[in-house]
Amino acid sequence: MAIVTLTRQSGSMGDEIGMLIARRLGYTFYSRKEIEQRIIAKGLSPEDLAKYDERKPTFLDRFSKARDKYLNYLSMVILEMAQEGNCVIMGRGAFLFLRDMPNHITLRFVSTQEKRLEHIKELVHITDDKLALKMLKDSDKRQSAFYKSCFHYDLNDHSLIHATINTASLNPDMTAEMIVAGITNNISADVEKRGEQRIGELILAQKITNKLIFEHNLRIDELWVLVRDNVITLNGVTAFHATVERAITIINSEWAGYEVRDEVKCVQDSIKSKA
């Protein structure tokens, strides 16, 4: 019926509410652990996962091919989970990968510092307020850095979030019940059908990206492939137009029947034409 993605402040009970939503809807709940396992299963080493998964990479690590692999594996894992349907996905920028899906609902959970401290102390079995506060601040810092580094996204910008919910004054059961009612009352069969079509396009776009970058090693920086209505559009930056021509040849060979549009900026060719 729907794809639900969640983000949450540490200590805001987001995981607990997410599991309640999934249970009430009969959906699959995908936690951090499940996402990590699937990324490793695709071929990323546990060591590289530890460098990039919801944390800010070092300056040198930001330019590593392992980082590109992590983001591509993460994207494919999220898209495959969405394609399986009827799921609740926690964190990892899932809402950004799925943001233009018609049957996608994304929520963010926040809470007061007092409630967050109270909950984090219960979770890790500590009584020290200073230690708990440090844990919350470190978590917020890592999460913010991860989104800025990997997605150029500011978590304080809620324009891509459908609803931000303060869990401080609502119990988890009531919060989950309200969300479930909203989902069941607003996701129609037509919306679900359009969502299935869109996820297929998103997965194809990711497959094309992986094919061009990792199998054929084409040098197209910031490659973004858009697939919609039988049209494949290539965006990015490269040195020579010949690289784009090679990419188009590969796409036509692997995925015949699509119109391919070139929106890639060729820097070196532009410099030569001006000289």
Image (cartoon, rainbow, N blue to C red):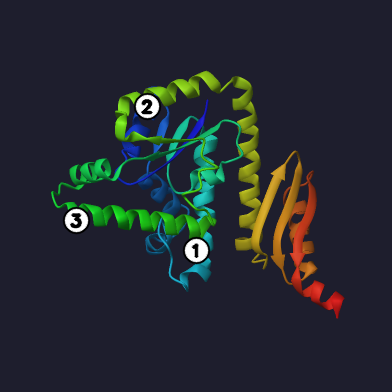
At a point 15% along the width and 46% down the height, the residue shown is 125
Compute the Cα span from label 2 to label 1.
35 Å
Identify which amino acid the numbered label 1 is placed on: Arg
Q: Are marks 3 and 1 in contact (CB under 8 Å)?
A: no
Residue, far bottom: 275
**Camera-side mark, 2 or 1:** 2
Left or right: where 89 falls relative to 253:
left
**Camera-side mark, 3 or 1:** 3
Q: Which residue is mark 3?
A: 130
Q: What SS does tag 2 mark?
A: helix
Q: What SS does tag 3 mark?
A: helix
Quadrant occupied by the C terminus: bottom right
Q: Which residue is mark 1?
A: 67
Identify which amino acid the numbered label 2 is placed on: Ala
Q: Which residue is mark 2?
A: 176
Left or right: where 13 falls relative to 225:
left
Left or right: where 113 falls relative to 214:
left
Identify which amino acid the numbered label 3 is placed on: Lys
Left or right: where 63 falls relative to 259:
left
Q: Are marks 3 and 2 in contact (CB under 8 Å)?
A: no
The residue closer to the viewer here, 237 or 178, is 178
Q: What SS does tag 1 mark?
A: helix
Q: Earlier in the sequence, mark 3 or mark 1?
A: 1
